[in-house]
Image (tube, coloured by chain):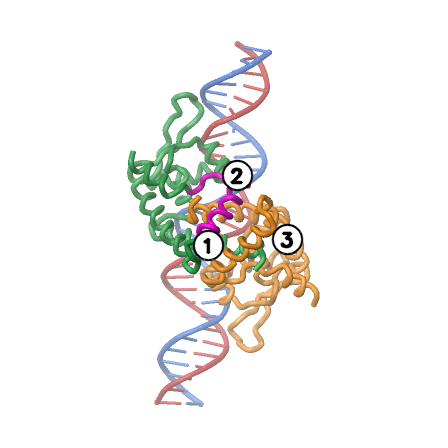
Chain colours: A orange, B green, C blue, D red
Amino acid sequence: MSVVAALVRSSFLVNAVYAASSRKYGLTPQQGQLLCVLMPQPYGMSELGAMLGLAKSSLTGLVDRTAQRGLVRREPDPEDGRAVRIALTPEGAELVEEFYDETCRRVEDLPAGLGDDERRLLADLLGRVVLDNQVPVVFVEPDEEAAAHGR
Amino acid sequence: MSVVAALVRSSFLVNAVYAASSRKYGLTPQQGQLLCVLMPQPYGMSELGAMLGLAKSSLTGLVDRTAQRGLVRREPDPEDGRAVRIALTPEGAELVEEFYDETCRRVEDLPAGLGDDERRLLADLLGRVVLDNQVPVVFVEPDEEAAAHGR
DNA sequence: AAGGTGTAGTTCGTACTGCGAACGTCGCTG
DNA sequence: CAGCGACGTTCGCAGTACGAACTACACCTT
């Protein structure tokens, strides 16, 4: 299989898994992604837009709906009167932890046909592609999730 | 980087590239995907639903909009009076060829930081994940596109 | 201090996505 | 030929995403 087809089709696969996992927790994939991004720390709307690749106006709606479900909160930025910081509420933090874990389990299972060495190799190669292309941290490392939860 | 984070983040990256490529040709990502699936041959609505992972009702709308743009056509199935075959129109075939090529070029560039051997390795590992998980052919191999075009 | 410029977010209107439920139509089987 | 099941469509609804226009505040220049 060509690199291109492999990348596109695996992306399709991961998306489907992500969507299924979201659905299990009553989230849309976008809301799930928003929550995941916010796991390490709060962000401003502009930062979120840049990370998620969304227009400002798209983000307003997404945050509105997620806030309406009580998962996220708009906090005034202490240093900038115009700005806002989007943070997880306690309920949001709790939910995203379950969602995140579930998603990890499901994605972890995708390369079940690969041996341990091969998985490490895949992680390394794909990780370099991610880093080379400066992909935003839309999904944190498992250990960081534990750290975020710990504090 | 963990396998999970690498898979999720690379998926995010590929999606963004796919969306940008679609946009360049005035397509939504979903319409682009529909056209790509139809490149090798026409399919019925049910088959498309299974391949794209969409509910029947979602597909009706997608096909409606894509047909309205003159890119696909509903043909009656000669063997089944209820069924319909969705096929590319000549304009659709022309457009998808450009879109497909553009997308290939862009995705091809993503692993630019990898050597030839590493790219082959990545393609092999990721290809196995795709095959093991029976991911539908939402994106054909480059040579198949040439073949489809040739006939 | 005053005014201009730019940034942060929101609002609004529009097109598209995706789902489930309910429905008509046709094929197949008993 | 009656009825069951598969093929698609319609409808209503919630969500996604964008650009343009707008408000409010920050910062810089004068």
Reading the image, the residue beneath label 3 is A99
Of marks 3 and 1, the one in the foreground: 1
Q: Was residue B72 drawn as part of the magenta stretch in this picture? A: no
Among the 4 quarters of the image, the one containing residue C29: top right
Q: Residue A123: x and y, percent? A: 55, 55
Q: CB of mark 3 within 8 Å of CB of mark 1?
A: no
Say if B97 sits above or below D22 in the image: above
Residue in the foreground of this view, choosing between B125 and B142: B125
Q: Amino acid at mark 3?
A: Phe
Which class describes the residues within 10 Å of circle 1: few (<14), some (14-19), or many (20+)?
some
In this rendering, would A97 be left or right of C1?
Answer: right
Q: Residue at x 30, y 38 (%)?
A: B149
Query: Magenta residues?
Result: B118-139
Q: SS of the residue at dot 2?
A: loop
Q: Residue at x 51, y 40 (%)?
A: B131
Q: Residue at x 44, y 53 (%)?
A: B117
Provide the chain ID for the residue under circle 2. B
Reading the image, the residue beneath label 2 is B134
Which class describes the residues within 10 Å of circle 3: few (<14), some (14-19), or many (20+)?
many
Reading the image, the residue beneath label 1 is B118
Q: Amino acid at mark 1?
A: Glu
Q: Residue A125: x and y, percent? A: 50, 56
Q: Residue at x 50, y 35 (%)?
A: B50
Q: Amino acid at mark 2?
A: Gln
Say if B46 sits above or below A112 in the image: above
Provide the chain ID for the residue under circle 3. A
Magenta-drawn stretch, dominant element (helix, strand or loop)? helix
Q: Was residue B131 drawn as part of the magenta stretch in this picture? A: yes
Which class describes the residues within 10 Å of circle 2: few (<14), some (14-19), or many (20+)?
few
> How much space separates mark 3 and mark 2, taking CA atoms?
24 Å
